[in-house]
Amino acid sequence: MRAQLAYKPKPGEIPTNPGVYRFRDAQGRVLYVGKAKNLRQRLSNYFASLHTLHERTRRMVTTAASVEWTVVPTDVDSLQLEYQWIKEFDPPFNVRYKDDKSYPFMAITLADEAPRVIVTRNHRIPGAKYFGPYPKVWAVHDTIDLMVKVFPIRTCSDASYKRAMQTGRPCFPGQIGKCGGPCSQRVTIEEHRAMVGDFIAFMQGGDERFTRDLTARMKAAAAAMDYEQAAILRDRLTSIQAVLNKSALVLPADEDADLFGIAEDELSAAVQHFVIRGGRVRGVSSTTLDKELDISGGELVDQILQREYGDAAPADVPRRVLVPTLPPDVGDLELWLRERRGKAVEIAVAQRGQRAELLRNATLNAQQALLRHKTRRTSDYVARTQALSDLQEALGMSEAPLRIECFDISHLQGTNVVGSMVVFEDGLPRKDQYRSFSIPHTTDDTDSIHQVLTRRLAHLDRPEETEQPAPDPTDGDVVVGAEAKPRRRFAYPPQLLIVDGGRPQVEAAARALRETGHEEIALCGIAKRLEEIWLPGDDYPVILPRTSEALYLVQRLRDEAHRFAITHQRRKRKRDIRSVLSEVPGLGEARIKLLLRHFGSVSALRAATAEQIEELPGIGPKLAATVIEHLRSDTRETGVTA
C-alpha cells in the first residue's frame, strides 16, 4: 500500500468555500461524490495518515488517482449538485439503492389519452402515477374495485379502448359497469380526465373534501326527490368509507408527512417509507441499499432524502418529514425541500406519541426487510456456489470450503463464559451439528477461543463415533438438535474455520491449530465493526466487495454463531438463577416457579422489593427478606456479551 497519495493537493490549494468534490480512478471513472460546507476542511480528512483512516475509506482513496472539486455559492446548491452527480455517475463508493420489486403497485397511466388504473410491478411506465406498494396483489384489486365505484375511470386494456373508440361500441368492462372511461360512451375525454384528477387527489389524501361533497349532493338529490341519483351517491359514499376503513387513521387528520424507518449494519441498510396523507398511511415503499464507506446515521438520512425527493413533484413533497436521526445539515435540506414544494418543509425526529409508535413499526419492517435482503441469496444454489468460489479465491484456498465451522464467545460481564460452534455445509446451516461449550476459569476472549478450538480439534483425532453420545459434562459440549439415530459427531473435518473477531482472536485460533497439528485447515476471522476478514499472520485485512456473495455468507455464519451463543447463554443463566433460588431455605420448586412466572424475568425479580415478593401466596416477610439477601449476594450480572 502506498505510504502517500501522489495526487494529494498542495497546502492551501483547496478552497474553503462550500462545494462538491469527486474522486476519480486512473481511467477517469468517478468513484465517490461528496459535498462540504468547507471543502478544505472536509477533504483534509481523506488525506490524513492512511493508518488512521477507516479501512474502506483507505481503500477508496488508494484506488483513486485524482480528486477534483466545484465551488458553489451556497450549501443548498451543493446539495443539488451532489444529487445530480450521484445520479449521473452512479459512483461505486456512494450509497447504492435497490428498490424492492417484490410488491405490486397501483398505477395511473397519465401519459395515455384516457388514463387507466392498473396493477403493476413495473416502476418505469412513462408518465405514470404510482400508489403503494401493497402487501398482496388482491389488496390492490380490492382497492381499485372500491375506488372505481366512487371515481369511475378507465380500467380496460389499451386494445379494448382503441377498438371501442373506433367502432363507437362500449368496451366489454364498460358494458358491465366496470369501466368508466370514454370507451364506455358515457363521458368525454375531458370529463374523464377531470375524474382521473379526482381519483388521484383522493388517493393523495383529499378524502374530507370528497366526503363532504358527496354528502351534500346526496342530500340535495334526496330533497329534490331524485331518489335514484341519491342512491347512486349514497353507494359512492359507502365505497369511500370502505376505502378509508382499510386505511386506519394513524396521525391527526390534518397531518401530511413522510416517515422513514431505517435498519442498518456495517454494509447494508433497509428503508421503510410510509407516505401519510390526511393522517392515513397511503403507501409504503421498501428500499435496500449498499454502503461502501463508513457513514453515520445522520449522513445516511441525508442521502436517503436526497434520493427520495431529488426528482419529486411539488405535490409529492410533504410539509413534514419524520426520520430516526437528524442529518448534519438539516437546515440546508429543509431549504432544498422548500424549493421543491414551494412551501415550508420541516424535518423532525419522531420522539413520542403516535409518531414514535409509527416509527417503531416502520423500523421493525425495515429490520425484517434487511434480514430478507441478507438471507435471500442463500436459497439460490447458483449464489451459494458463487459464494464458496469467491471465498476460496479471497482466502487463497486450494478448494472450495464445502464445510465451514464458525465460533463465537459469549459471557455475562466476564462470568459464565460459553462458546458456540455453528456448521454450514454447501452454504446451508446444519443445525443438528451445532455445539455449545462451557468455558470455566477464564475471562479472556482470546484464551476462550483457544480453549474451544483445542477441544473441537481434538475430536478429529479420535476414532469415528457412530452412536448418539450423551453430553459430556467434563468436556462441556452441549449437543443441540440431537436425533435418535447414528451419526458422526465431530469426526468430519472442516475446510474452513471462522472466528468472530480480529487479529487477536485469529492468532489464538491459529495457535490452537498449530498445537493440535491441524494447520491444513484454513482459518480466518471477521471483525464486526468494519466487516474485515483477517488471516493469520497478515498485517492488513482482506476487504471483500460489499456485494460479494462470499461476504454475505461469512456475515450469516457470524450472525448465526452469535445468535446461538446468546441463546445458550440465556438458557445457562436461567439454570443459574434457579440454582441460586434453590439455595434459599423454605423456597421449594413450586415457589421458585411462582416467582419466575410472576415477575416474568430475572432482571424484574432482582429489582423487586421485599414487599412486592410478600404479595405472592405462601411467601411471608421473613422468606421474602431471605430471597432478597440471596439475590443480592449473587454478584453475577444479567447483561449478555458476545
Image (cartoon, rainbow, N blue to C red):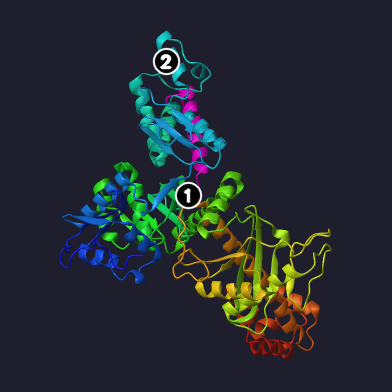
Amino acid on which the number 2 mark rests in the picture:
Lys
Determine if the magenta segment contains residue 229.
yes
Determine if the magenta segment contains residue 638.
no
Q: Name the secondary structure under disc 1.
A: loop
Give the side of residue 348 with respect to residue 407, left or right: left
Q: Is residue 265 visible?
A: yes
Q: Residue at 15% of width from left, 55% of height from top?
A: 73
Amino acid on which the number 1 mark rests in the picture:
Leu
Residue where numbered disc 2 is placed = 162
Q: Judge whether 48 appears above or below 31 on screen.
A: below
Residue where numbered disc 1 is placed = 249
Give the side of residue 314 with respect to residue 498, left or right: left
Q: Name the secondary structure under disc 2.
A: helix
* Bounds of the magenta segment: 224-250
Please tell me how crowded label 2 is: few (under 14), some (14-19), or many (20+) other residues with Cα within 10 Å. Answer: few
Closer to the camera, 538 or 466?
538
Q: Position of residue 612 (x, y in %)?
A: 66, 81
Closer to the camera, 286 or 584?
286
Q: Judge whether 140 appears above or below 436 on screen.
A: above
Please tell me how crowded label 1 is: few (under 14), some (14-19), or many (20+) other residues with Cα within 10 Å. Answer: some
